[in-house]
Image (cartoon, rainbow, N blue to C red):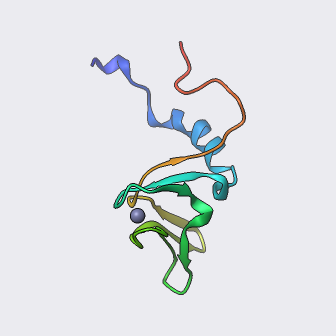
Amino acid sequence: MTEMSYLDGNMLDGPLRELLAVDLSAATGRCASCGMVGPMAGLRVWAHAPGLVGRCPSCAEVMLRLVRAPDRAWLDLRGATYLQVPMPTAEPFPRPL
Ligand SMILES: [Zn+2]
């Protein structure tokens, strides 16, 4: 891989903005612990922690943590192997040059 084969991370702004503006309750996630695939709306959420904690309905491991401060937020998805988000039909990323 040469230095000219990658782009600056600033190019992620548009694609991530499009992704994060959708209704994530319609997204499907895969639990990193047990492999269960299901809707994010099916997570069991604990709201009396310092943030929101979403646990897998199958194995109870943490799949999502969301902490909101007045001026920023932290999203921890390390308990999810992936998040599949329904999107309007468009050209997939990365777009050909
Ligand atoms: Zn699980």
**What residue is at 44 percent from the left and 31 percent from the top?**
8
**What residue is at 56 percent from the left and 51 percent from the top?**
28
Location of residue 93 in the rendering, given as x and y in whole percent from the top left corner: 55, 27
**What residue is at 56 percent from the left and 82 percent from the top?**
47
**Which quadrant of the figure has residue 60?**
bottom left
Location of residue 89 in the rendering, given as x and y in whole percent from the top left corner: 71, 30
Quadrant of the drawing holding the N terminus:
top left
Total count of labels: 0
Compared with 35, 14 (above or below) is above
Depth order, front residue of 90/84? 84
Location of residue 95 in the rendering, given as x and y in whole percent from the top left corner: 56, 20
Depth order, front residue of 70/34? 34
Residue at the extreme top of the image, as rendered:
97
**Which quadrant of the figure has residue 85?**
top right
Residue at the extreme bottom of the image, as rendered:
48
Left or right: 44 in relation to 9: right
Compared with 48, 85 (above or below) is above
Depth order, front residue of 18/86? 86
Location of residue 41 in the rendering, given as x and y in whole percent from the top left corner: 62, 63
Residue at the extreme left of the image, as rendered:
1
Left or right: 54 in relation to 89: left
Compared with 67, 16 (above or below) is above
**Which quadrant of the figure has residue 90?**
top right
The quadrant where ligand 1 appears is bottom left
Compared with 96, 26 (above or below) is below
Depth order, front residue of 93/32? 32
